Image: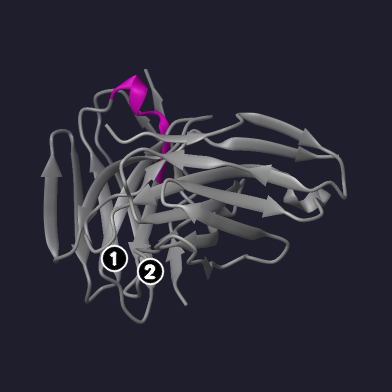
Amino acid sequence: GQNIDQPTEMTATEGAIVQINCTYQTSGFNGLFWYQQHAGEAPTFLSYNVLDGLEEKGRFSSFLSRSKGYSYLLLKELQMKDSASYLCALLGEAAGNKLTFGGGTRVLVKP
Amino acid sequence: DVKVTQSSRYLVKRTGEKVFLECVQDMDHENMFWYRQDPGLGLRLIYFSYDVKMKEKGDIPEGYSVSREKKERFSLILESASTNQTSMYLCASTLRGSRNSPLHFGNGTRLTVT
């Protein structure tokens, strides 16, 4: 099976940077996704890492290290609208593109 | 833009009732999924399907069944609803064979079983 761990909650200040860590134990996976979910809404796709290294998309970056079983999502120049839950998910190797999610990290951005 | 539509936003059902949750996607995706989301437990996979009439158990299939008669529609069935099935249910779809194709989620159905 797969075990995915994220911190439950983080607080940061508007304009600052926050790093959300995700550690996992798994026998194998195709890639790692990050999703954003605002309260009461569906998750929306943020980024995807298949190889080790950093993927940058505007204010959001995601990093993967397969050897360390570790990923992080970096949010720069935080805005109030970034207050949301951030979900780390592993894409399985079997047919069906099955995603297994961590518990999510709730980020609260304060003025 | 991909659209995944869940038929109900909120549902209230009684214990023992048979409940149908419907999901339709309009992008010809092969793969469809049903998750439930509970505080502290995150998103957990109930069932998924990678083709018409195909279904696979996810991590928590007990108490649920599914139906995929047409490619665009994936139904979740609670044969006899119980209070521990009170939850937010999320349907999702994605292209088959594309490893970096993200899941597209519906807006969710919040089911309360009394």
Please give the name of the residue rendered at 21% of the width and 60% of the height, measured from the top-left corner. Answer: B98
- Between A30 and A67, the residue placed more toward the observer is A30
Which quadrant holds the N terminus of chain B? Answer: top left
Please give the name of the residue rendered at 82% of the width and 48% of the height, measured from the top-left corner. Answer: B83
Check disc 1 and give the amino acid type: Tyr
Whether the residues at callouts 1 and 2 have beta carbons within 8 Å, the answer is yes
Q: Which residue reaches farthest front? A: B69
Question: Is B61 situated left or right of A28 in this image?
Answer: right
In the rendered structure, find residue A24 and report the number of the disc placed on it.
Answer: 2
In the rendered structure, find residue B24 and report the number of the disc placed on it.
Answer: none
Mark 1 lies on residue: A70
**Relative to B79, residue A68 above or below:** below
- Residue B97 lies in quadrant: bottom left
Which quadrant holds the C terminus of chain B? Answer: top right
Question: What secondary structure is marked by label 1?
Answer: strand
Please give the name of the residue rendered at 65% of the width and 60% of the height, measured from the top-left corner. Answer: B65
User: The disc numbered 1 marks a residue on which chain?
Assistant: A
A21 part of magenta stretch: no
Q: Is residue B99 visible?
A: yes
- Between B51 and B89, the residue placed more toward the observer is B51
Determine crowd level at label 1: few under 14, some 14-19, many 20+ residues with C-alpha closer than 10 A. Answer: some
| Image location (x, y in percent) of residue B9 | 60, 29
1 or 2: tag closer to the N-terminus = 2
Question: Is B77 situated left or right of A21 in this image?
Answer: right
Magenta segment range? A79-86
